[in-house]
Image: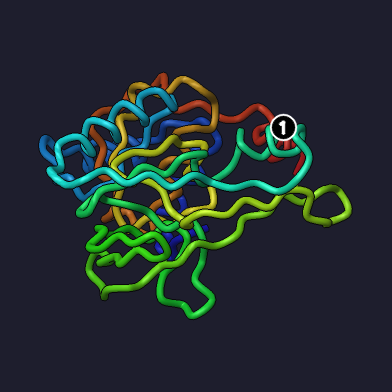
């Protein structure tokens, strides 16, 4: 869990169970905002919506486009499996001033998986990124791996450890911690997605909701079964 706020934890647990208590209603209504700035990552249930939103935002930046191909090592079937769930795309398309999200924890602690910032300089081997509310960091290409059941790497993928951050899917947001995010819960239909989206936030103050519906607060059946067996 990404927060120590006890009231927020209770809200998350209630949403995870698919329940809509008065406190959940008050919380969701209280986080609804009419206008949100462009430095917030928007969570969508569909990948198509994410791609369209990111491309539109990137096209609005008047700087040259740079593309970086992810390189893979491994068997074709393993590479294909990795691509479906990889935190980075096959081709990373960037521009100076683009909003990006780091997708790995930095060993030196300068950023975490989910840290967001703007690209200030692009070279073939390094990106300079101004983190939101933080300092400027230089990021080099790094390696992602897919492990088999024995814990042995079967795929190695190399590229800059980031992606465009104006939008991402709720599914791909798992494992990240976001300082701020926006989401339209009314467009969610899959059980458990509302909980996953809300629980990405480091604190409740970082959640901005465009809209929501009671129909979107659905529990994952496996989660309900697990809690029912306790």
Q: Is residue 149 left or right of residue 132?
A: right
Q: x, y percentage for residue 173? A: 47, 44
Label 1 sits on a secondary structure element that is helix
**Residue lying at 26% horizontally and 58% vertically, measured from the top left:** 119
150 or 188, which is in the foreground?
150
In the rendered view of the protein, which quadrant contains the C terminus?
Answer: top right
Q: x, y percentage for residue 184? A: 30, 30
- Specify how the rendered protein is coloured: rainbow
Q: Is residue 143 left or right of residue 147?
A: left
Residue 91 visible: yes
Q: x, y percentage for residue 165? A: 33, 46
Q: Is residue 35 left or right of residue 173?
A: left
Count of numbered tags: 1
Which image quarter: residue 34?
A: top left
Which image quarter: residue 61?
A: top left
| Pointer 1 residue | 225
91 or 29, which is in the foreground?
91
Q: x, y percentage for residue 166? A: 28, 42
Residue 7 visible: no
Determine crowd level at label 1: few under 14, some 14-19, many 20+ residues with C-alpha closer than 10 A: few
**Residue lying at 77% horizontally and 32% vertically, measured from the top left:** 77
**Residue lying at 17% horizontally and 45% vertically, measured from the top left:** 38
- Among all residues in the image, which is located at the extreme front? 124
**Residue lying at 42% horizontally and 31% vertically, measured from the top left:** 20
């Amino acid at each position: 869990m990404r927060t120590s706020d006890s009231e927020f934890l209770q809200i998350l647990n209630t949403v995870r169970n698919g329940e809509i208590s008065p406190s959940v209603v008050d919380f969701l209504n209280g986080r609804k905002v009419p206008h949100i700035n462009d430095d917030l990552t928007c969570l969508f249930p569909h990948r198509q919506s994410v791609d369209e939103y990111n491309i539109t935002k990137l096209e609005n930046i008047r700087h040259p486009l740079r593309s970086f191909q992810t390189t893979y090592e491994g068997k074709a079937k393993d590479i294909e499996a990795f691509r479906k769930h990889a935190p980075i795309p096959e081709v990373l398309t960037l521009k100076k001033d683009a909003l990006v999200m780091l997708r790995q924890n930095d060993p030196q602690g300068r950023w975490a998986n989910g840290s967001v910032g703007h690209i200030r300089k692009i070279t073939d081997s390094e990106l300079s990124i101004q983190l939101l509310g933080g300092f400027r960091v230089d990021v080099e290409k790094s390696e992602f791996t897919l492990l088999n059941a024995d814990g042995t790497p079967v795929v190695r993928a190399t590229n800059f450890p980031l992606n465009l951050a104006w939008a991402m899917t709720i599914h791909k947001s798992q494992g990240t911690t976001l300082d701020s995010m926006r989401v339209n819960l009314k467009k969610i239909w899959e059980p458990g997605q509302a909980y996953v989206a809300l629980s990405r936030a480091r604190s409740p103050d970082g959640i901005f909701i465009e809209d929501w519906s009671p129909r979107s607060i659905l529990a994952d059946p496996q989660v309900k079964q697990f809690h029912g067996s306790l």
